[in-house]
Amino acid sequence: MGGPNLLRSQIALGDRDGERIVPVIQGSLAASGMPAISMPPDAAKATAAYVRSVLATIGVQGKPPSSTEPATIVVGNAAEGQDYFAARCANCHSVTGDLKGLASRISDPKTLQNTWVAGRSRGGRLGGGGGPPADSKPVTVTVRQPSGESIDGKLTRIDDFLVTLELPDGTSRTFRRDGDVPKVEVHDPLDAHRKLLSVLSDKNMHDVTAFLETLK
């Protein structure tokens, strides 16, 4: 209808609590043709929550929910899905490890499909079942100082001016940013899933879903 499809938007799919959608509403993409929308911060966060709620109900990738959905979305080729999984997913996931029994833990095929495409469930990462898995990996960051010192920790906050990380001992450190100094490297376990969205076809999605349905 003239605008970008939010159901395939990496900004929308990566949003957790408005941190990606709200800045767009406030004008962060004005230079790209998306004007700022005047609304109170609470309303902007509510709008982001609404977009996430729609994303959670998609039945076919990139298309709006439909009241005429087929009886089952398991329509793909499991063998071809296994090949796709081996080529694209096996570096991070294992059918005998984090995904063992996945289809038993997520028994609804639609929820299973939405979970693996997004890379996470409400409780944690893909494979986590009803809660965050023991090996759930947070977003981490490496700050490389001009002196050569590197500091690693869990990312707490980042913007154009500051980066804050939680160190292994539980303390926090904040570094002022001036362009590319210090060099900041963000390590997001879900980044591979976000990049996959730009190349994932409906057939790939259905085939992998059919394969994952066999992991009971």
Image: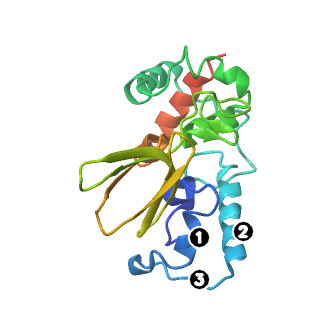
Can residue 127 be spotted in the picture?
A: yes
Residue type at mark 2 is Ala
Residue type at mark 3 is Ile
Can residue 114 be spotted in the picture?
A: no
The image quarter in which residue 45 lies: bottom right
Question: Marks 2 and 3, Cα distance to the nearest angstrom?
Answer: 14 Å
Residue type at mark 1 is Val
Name the side, left or right, on which 120 lies relative to 207.
right
Residue sitting nearer the eye, 212 or 157: 157
**Residue behind mark 3:** 37
Name the side, left or right, on which 129 lies relative to 125.
right
Name the side, left or right, on which 185 lies relative to 6.
left
Question: Marks 2 and 1, Cα distance to the nearest angstrom?
Answer: 9 Å
Question: Marks 1 and 3, Cα distance to the nearest angstrom?
Answer: 10 Å
Sort mark 3 into few (<14), some (14-19) or many (20+) by Cα contacts within 10 Å. few
Which residue is drawn at the image coordinates 51% and 29% (left, top)?
207
**Residue behind mark 1:** 22
Q: Quadrant of the C terminus?
A: top right
Q: Secondary structure at mark 3?
A: loop
Which residue is drawn at the image coordinates 49% and 72% (left, top)?
2
Q: Secondary structure at mark 1?
A: helix
Give x and y (percent) for residue 176. 40, 66
As drawn, the label of residue 46 is 2
44, above or below 104, in the image: below
Q: Are marks 1 and 3 in contact (CB under 8 Å)?
A: no
Q: Are marks 2 and 1 in contact (CB under 8 Å)?
A: no
Of the two numbered discs 1 and 3 on the same chain, state the one appearing first in sequence.
1
5, above or below 211, in the image: below
